[in-house]
Amino acid sequence: MFKKACLEGLMTSHQLTLTLLETEAAEPAAREVLEATREALGFVPNMYAAMANSPALLDSYVHGYGQFRQGSALTPVEQEVVLLAISVDNQCSYCVAAHSFVADAMSKVPKNVTDAIRAGELIPDQRLAALAQFTAAMLDTRGRPSAGEVAAFLDAGYEERHVLSVILAIAVKTLSNYTNHFFDTDVDPAFASRSWTSAELEPTT
């Protein structure tokens, strides 16, 4: 499903010299978000501490992520499939680990579905497979899927408004995936049980 070969070697991309910011060191706008996150989760995810270097980036991510979760018209399971599919395609180890954990503990995605996405394999659920395949098509074509790819998505029971939900998810995950690429963000202990690397992807033929 996902292209491993074309992304090999990208893990050596340039790393920023910025550090993960402690809440007290962040600018007021970012500090407010970090404090609210700590209150909600009990800790500040490393990705948020990285994003705090740009309060506008952190705020945009948190707002967009919240909008996707609350108003995307996709179920929690479907949301997680989309977020995981994007993160695997972008080879973001941090986000794959985090969303795998959320999939298991909160969204209640069947483990065989999550594991299939992590391995780049076909999902053993026809509807969810169509969702992941359409998400991959959106990424591969930079938002210009073929009429056939759109038709397959709609034939699986989705509606045109769900196309827009996938666009929102891609926008949100681009913010997080790209940030993690530049920081090589360490996976938080809370998500470590679902750590992931691109080596888990099945080779494409």
Image: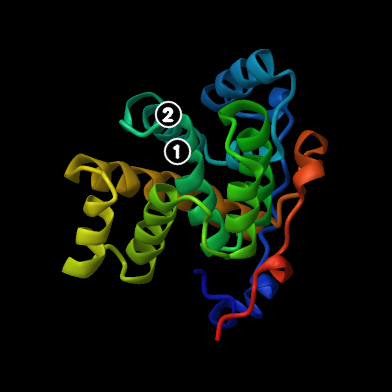
Q: Do the residues labelled 2 and 1 touch (CB within 8 Å)?
A: yes
Q: Name the spot of residue 7 as percent of width and height, x first.
A: 57, 77
Give residue 143's position: percent from left, percent from top.
27, 62
Quadrant of the rendering where the C terminus is positioned: bottom right
- The residue that disc 2 covers is 69
Is residue 56 shown above or below 2? Answer: above
Q: Residue 55, image x and y in percent? A: 51, 34
For mark 2, give the secondary structure.
Answer: helix
The disc at residue 79 is 1
Looking at marks 2 and 1 on the same chain, the residue that comes earlier in the sequence is marked by 2
Q: In this view, does 100 lie to the left or right of 78?
A: right
Nearest to the observer: residue 110 or residue 51: 110
Q: Residue at x 54, y 56 (%)?
A: 178
| Residue drawn at x 53%, y 54% as measured from the top left | 124
* Crowdedness near tag 1: few (<14), some (14–19) or many (≥20) residues, C-alpha within 10 Å: many
Which residue is situated farthest in the bottom direction here?
A: 205
Distance from the alpha carbon under mark 2 to that under mark 1: 7 Å
Taking the spot 59% from the left edge, 31% from the top edge, the residue there is 108
Q: In this view, does 50 lie to the left or right of 196?
A: left
36 shown above or below 19: above
Q: Is residue 47 above or below residue 66?
A: below
Q: Which of marks 2 and 1 is in front?
A: 1
Name the amino acid, label 2: Arg
In this rendering, is residue 57 above or below 32?
below
Q: How crowded is mark 2: few (under 14 residues within 10 Å), some or many (20 or more)?
A: some
In this view, the residue in front, 22 or 162, is: 162
Quarter assignment of residue 15: bottom right
What kind of residue is marked 1?
Gln
The residue closer to the viewer here, 107 or 111, is: 111
